[in-house]
Image (cartoon, rainbow, N blue to C red):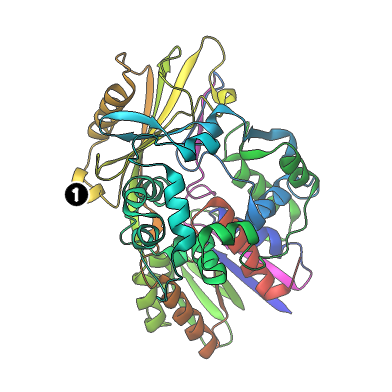
Amino acid sequence: MQKTVAVLGGGIGGLSACFHLSKSPQVSKIVLLEGDGRFGGWLSSTRREDGAVFEHGPRGIRPAGDVGRNTLNMVGTVEELGLESEVLPVTYDHVASKNRCLYVGGQLHKMPSGLGGVMRTVPPFSRPLVQSVLKEILTSRGKEEDESVHSFVSRRLGTELADIAIDSLCRGVFAGDCRKLSVRSCLPPLYNAEKARGSIILGMLLGSGPGPDVPPSTLTKRSAQENWAQWSLKRGLQNLPEALEERMRNGGRVEVHRDTPVMGLSTNGTGWEIQLEDGTIKADHIIAALPAKALASALLSAAQPLSQQLCEIATVTVAVVNLEYEGSVLPVTGFGHLVPSSEDRGLLGVVYDSVPFPQHNRTGGPTTRLTVMMGGAWFQEVFGNPEEVTEQLLLDRATQAVTSHLGVTTPPIWSIVALLKDCIPQYYLGHWKRLENMRQYIRDHNLPLSLAGSSYDGVSVNDVIFSGRTAAEGLVGKV
């Protein structure tokens, strides 16, 4: 039995760990330590009095796969969080799911979809995608332990698809450079499909091995029956960490501390002493859901080799600019558009927020809400030092993009700029090996430490929530 477990970091991963620990009788005390003034990490929503909601981080969660079902199970079960009535689903037949665009050559191009889109040449591509599919099935299995996403897709599907579509995808999901990102760590379904079946296509059709067992809840079954592509919450995704925090406080099993940064960690091999600004806390086990570099700094004296490995996990900074325009100003409808690095290194993409989630528009007359995402792996190159860049520069750059890409000539009636420093970890080549070495070091030195959060096994909301659950169940068994 674990006496006291300290969870470091009150983002969605740390909250998930506490949520699952609190359901087990095997822990006598759970302490949650968050250095910031609010919980939820990058899940952050602005709610205006007129009903408008603006997301500064993730804005939609996918229900697919084991980790997607896990999140919906947590959200929908009444005795869990009871947010089922708050869910805003977007189905696969919604225009936001069917229409996704790329901005290439100074023009918007709808991504090919359906059999017709695959069989004929659709700009910006120079040949039908079916040729890439046939090439993929006939390409032999790779022999490398790891490979960049760009190299993997070029080898299996062709360079054009890698240069345009996959480059844009990696910028939209990871704000990263597909020539540096690891396919094994960033896109494990593709890597595993090739390893198991010798082909991405065959792996997707036939399966590439069992995943974690996540039984479906009522909400999960509903999402499958109604064919959801993604979902949000009526009050924005910040409502999810808020509901988790409220459950922690009301449940009486978790001692919750905000504005409590961890200054250092020391261990005698059987437990931890956690140094805070105003004292210390003792714990038998730590679940660290901090960013890797923050944990590295705290661990420096207690586990220097582990600290060094943690420091090597890079991150990128993203500028997120929310814009609101009077009336309906979009020349196209869809989820939004992504921009490949060959077109504009600084501009990652534009999300047409009012299309998938019109419920987040203000009450009264029609408006259009957009989010412009900029920087990522190219932030320093394009905008300079994040500590010195001005909000006005970022706002000007965002509105210029909306004008040039979408032909919107009127100025926005409302805007807000968020600079998310070091927000997305970058899983570069060899990330899997670094994780293996870190976890081996923890085992070899009997450190009562579990790693959770976006720095390790996936950056999506679903991945991070599942990492918190995995860390908790690694201590107390399945809950």
Residue 31 is one of the magenta-drawn residues: yes
Q: Quadrant of the C terminus?
A: bottom right
The span shown in magenta is 25-49
For image coordinates 45% across by 14% down, the residue present is 328
User: Of helix, strand and loop, which mostly describes the magenta segment?
Assistant: loop
Q: How many marks?
A: 1
Q: Is residue 343 magenta?
A: no
- Which one is nearer the viewer's eye here, 242 or 135? 135
Q: Nearer the viewer, residue 123 or 354?
A: 123
Q: Amino acid at mark 1?
A: Glu
**Up/down of 208 relative to 266, above or below:** above
Residue 300 in view, yes or no: yes
Q: Which residue is mark 1?
A: 381
Mark 1 Cα-neighbour bin, 10 Å: few <14, some 14–19, many ≥20: few
Would residue 35 appear left or right of 398 to someone viewing this image? right
User: Where is 96 relative to 200, above or below?
Assistant: above
Q: Identify the secondary structure beneath mark 1.
A: helix
In the depicted structure, whether residue 292 falls above or below residue 160? below
Q: Position of residue 406 (x, y in %)?
A: 34, 22
Q: Quadrant of residue 206?
A: bottom right
Image point 52% across, 53% down: which residue?
Answer: 460
Where is residue 45? Give x, y as percent: 51, 36
The picture quadrant where one finds residue 313 is bottom left
**109 versus 191 height, above or below:** above
